[in-house]
Image (tube, rainbow, N blue to C red):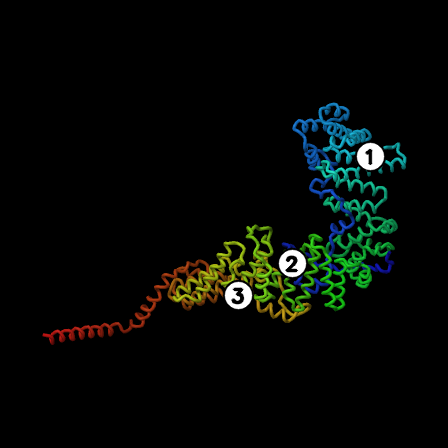
Amino acid sequence: MFIRNGLLCLTLSLPLGSALACGPDFPLRLLSDRAHTLAELPEGSFQFEASRLGSAIAGLKPATAATLGYGYYGDGDPYVQEKTKAEQVSLSDAQQTLVAQLRQLKDPQQALIQGASLPAELSLYSAGAVAFNAGEYQQATEYFRQVLALPADQRALRSTWAAYSLGRALYAISVQANDLDELARRDMLLLARKAFQQTRQLSVDGFSDPQELGISSLGEEARLLLEDGNWNGAIGLYATQSLHGSPVGLSSLKQLVAQLSAMPDAELAQLLEGKPVQQLVTAALISHMGWSYGEQPPSEQKLIKALILSTAASLENADRLAALNYQIGDYTTTQTLLEHAGDGGLAWWLRAKLALRAGDKAAAASAYAKAAKAFPQTESWGYRTDDNGYYETLKPGCRVEGESAVLALERGDYLQAFDQLYRSDDVYWQDTASIAERVLTLDELKQYVDSHVPAPPPTPKQESGYYTTLPIAAQLRELLGRRLLREGHYDQVSGYFDSPELQAKAKAYGQYRQDAESRWLPTARAEAYYQAAKLARESGMELLGYEMGPDFHALEGMYSLEIPPVEAGPFITAAEVQRQQATQAAPDVRYHYRYVAAQLANDSANFLPHSSQAFAAVLCKAARWTRGSDDELAYYQRYINQGPYVQWAENFGENCEEPTFDTANKRYVTQVVDAVRSALRPFKLALIAGASVLVLGAAFLLWNRRRAKR
């Protein structure tokens, strides 16, 4: 069944992308522009789309680095060096030396004679390789066929090599032999194809294939089909090669797209009658293979126009064609195509987006749920960057769950939204963290973590780029631990931090905060406040930092992202705004924990004698931790108004001594005595006279008492 031309009324205009700024890349956040997130359909992955055009071959192992090249290069090329290493696999030292010597010969007969001591498969293959390198292709085919004619147990090492090389030799004969007519040439190409097919079967059957020639043979056979005008068959083989992990297959498909875009219109239209060609073109278009940002290049516009005019638009490809129409803004054609697109994940994703455009959020939520179930969990479209430079590892199942979470937030289903984003693991972690620390209440978050996020085994922290390598479960638990400390639940933080070191610091910080409120002696309370302040300053990011703004623990504090003020608007309700305002950092500035530390130091000063060195020292620390702010001036002014003179005050806020709390404790006594002395100093003579009178009077009374007893 085919679609009429009118169903593919594709619009050729696309908006210009935003200009990219220089700087580090950051993860894409679905919640930063919710309306855009729900409206956008990200470009697909050409590699993934190409893999859908091929069929995996049972028993053929996935490709490794060995399939990166075919070995057509000079002796110094790394691929040739790898081939030489592969040729020595399973050979004794003596055999390795002899085979290497044979490969340097120019005469295949001489190679056969000198290699007589080798097993037959090695001597025959070496002679064939010498003949091939000398351009004696007919003679080379005879040697390779002799290898393949040996009993199976006598050709375990060189069977795949011989079959693959036989195919190459036969192809070379078809190209260079002048005495072949067209029929003979086609027969020769058919024999070459069969040799490449035999290569794959031998690899599947377990014959030695260190160069993964079974996978490489797919590309060789595809080239033969392409030269014969069989684009559909060639595309299938290249796609299968790519499906098995070979980058050569993928690059070959990209070259085919480039060739198609350069063809005359009539020739292109004829090829588009084939389903594989149409699918390849569609795959290239929906993945934006030829462009990233800005206006579509003319070559892509040409392919779109050719696809419009094609009468062979198969309904089996309807979901991909619908995606292409949606991306370029033809929503009417998208809707029509979706009526024939089946129940795949992409089709339901598009239905959700069209429902949102129609204002039917209930239908959109239902379609998102079906899309999430339809996409395999393992499906990944790979790495992409949007037109603002944010990157995303696009797993469509996670993406539709994330978009569905936007609708859940608007409905007030905050826990559902959080759960949907948390299931994306690290893909949308920043969105997950934003909800965890700003939207959920502390009780909601703690109950979820305690019920669904058990502590993973402790992970040694290793840095990778700008981001932590802790498992997401550990990151979420630490986020909760920091929030508990920020909100004063010191007794509940045990076990939420990943490392023993952080657990000890969190416990110490909580104990200091509790001691600061419960100790009897003022100086003991002051010291507890100060010790808490030091921890908040020295380990504040790890103990108190917000995962997102304003501290950006997610970026290890190295960068800050612009986060617009939270206001009610598209897909953001007043209720959510209220929740976010209730969990805002205090103060809401970058590295807010420094200001928390300074305030704790200021609280410490409240319990210290103003005349003590400790009073000046803790205020100096507070000023130092808030350097450049109004708070720094306030702490300095307090010292000026209330504190004692200290020699280092000239550089107040820079060179601060550590407070000596034991000396401060003594100052409580000496401070009272000094105050009394200061108050009585103007009455010194009168006091001395009075004291003298009192002493004389007491002496007189004592003398009278003793006299009376006599």
Q: What is the distance, in whole Å, between disc 2 and disc 3 at their CAs?
A: 26 Å
Q: Is residue 147 above or below residue 656?
A: above
Q: Amino acid at mark 1?
A: Leu
If you read the primary sequence from the N terminus, does the residue marked by circle 1 or circle 2 appear first?
1
Q: Which residue is painted at 77% across and 50% down in the image?
A: 52
Q: Which residue is mark 3?
A: 487
Q: Decide: marks 2, 3 in contact (CB < 8 A)? A: no
Q: Secondary structure at mark 1?
A: helix
Q: Which residue is painted at 56% across and 51% down in the image?
A: 459
Q: Which residue is painted at 60% across and 56% down in the image?
A: 472
Q: Amino acid at mark 2?
A: Arg
If you read the primary sequence from the N terminus, does the residue marked by circle 1 or circle 3 appear first?
1
Residue 194 is tagged as none
Q: Which residue is mark 1?
A: 170
Picture quadrant where residue 124 is located: top right
Position of 273 with respect to 441 (left or right) is right
Residue 172 percent coordinates (x, y): 82, 34
Q: What is the distance, in whole Å, between disc 1 and disc 3 at their CAs?
A: 77 Å
Looking at the picture, tell me which residue is in the foreground, 588 or 413. Answer: 413
Q: Which residue is mark 2?
A: 423
Density class for disc 2 (Cα within 10 Å; few <14, some 14-19, many ≥20) is: some
Q: Is residue 213 above or below residue 691?
A: above
Q: Amino acid at mark 3?
A: Glu
Density class for disc 3 (Cα within 10 Å; few <14, some 14-19, many ≥20) is: few
Residue 142 percent coordinates (x, y): 81, 29
